[in-house]
Image (spheres, rainbow, N blue to C red):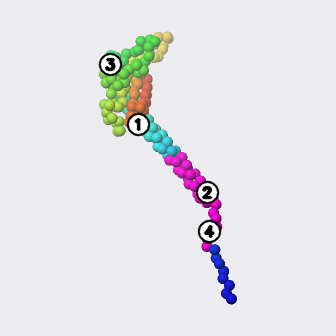
């Protein structure tokens, strides 16, 4: 007599542990991906802000050099067009109170700058500080040349008007 072997192909009852573990791993991978994406977006915004600040700095520096070249000992400071006499004692300096958007109150940089619109071109002002110093003493009497001091302030904007850089120098010129 032949002996028959019965093979049971019906699956045993499963508890679903593999499904639960797979879902947990998928959730963890999704959270890891979202965190990496958020970090990348933050770094991109930081790089864009740094780039815009550098652009504003370069614009302000261009305007600063432009105004510095315009100041000479014979320049007439008439309280307009970016050329100001000394502020009254006890008042704020001109660069804090001037209307930087007014073309008649400041000097506008005449050149063009890449990625900066004409309305955002950098601007500058020059102030006669009203200080004249005669250098060199011989037996208590000033013998050297006289020097005048001037403050030059420039304001540059980046690609937007939210990025503002102000630079300032003090010039000492022989009178």
Position above or below: 60 against 35: above
Is there CB contact under 8 Å for labels 3 and 2? no
Question: Can you give x and y, in whole percent of width and height, for residue 107 in the image?
Answer: 33, 25
Relative vertical location of residue 129 with respect to residue 160 in this rendering, above or below: above
**What span is in magenta?**
9-37
Q: Which mark is residue 21?
A: 2
Q: Position of residue 30 (x, y in %)?
A: 54, 51
The quarter holding residue 48 reads top left
For the C terminus, give its image quadrant.
Answer: top left
The reply to whether the C-beta atoms of the residues labelled 1 and 4 are less than 8 Å apart is no
Q: Main secondary structure of the magenta part?
A: helix
**Residue that appears at 41% across and 25% down:** 153
Q: Separation of disc 1 and disc 2 at Cα? A: 51 Å
| Residue 11: assigned label | 4
Most extreme residue toward the front is 1
- State the residue at coordinates (67%, 87%): 2
Judging by the rendered image, the residue that carries numbered circle 1 is 55
Q: Is tag 4's residue or tag 3's residue first in the polypeptide sequence?
A: 4
Do the residues under discs 4 and 2 have CB atoms within 8 angstroms? Answer: no
| Mark carried by residue 80 | 3
């Amino acid at each position: 007599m032949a002996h028959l072997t019965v093979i049971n192909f019906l699956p045993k009852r499963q508890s679903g542990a593999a499904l639960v573990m797979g879902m947990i791993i998928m959730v963890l991978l999704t959270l890891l991906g979202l965190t990496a994406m958020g970090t990348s977006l933050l770094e991109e915004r930081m790089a864009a802000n740094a780039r815009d600040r550098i652009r504003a700095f370069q614009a302000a520096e261009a305007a600063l050099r432009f105004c510095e070249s315009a100041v000479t000992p014979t320049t007439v400071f008439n309280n307009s067009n970016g050329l100001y006499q000394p502020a009254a004692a006890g008042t704020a300096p001109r660069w804090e109170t001037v209307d930087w958007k007014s073309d008649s109150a400041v000097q506008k940089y005449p050149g063009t700058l890449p990625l900066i619109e004409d309305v955002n071109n950098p601007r500058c002002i020059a102030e006669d500080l009203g200080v004249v110093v005669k250098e060199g003493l011989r037996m208590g009497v000033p013998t050297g040349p006289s020097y005048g001091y001037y403050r030059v302030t420039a304001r540059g904007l980046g690609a937007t008007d939210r990025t503002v850089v102000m630079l300032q120098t003090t010039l000492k010129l022989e009178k």
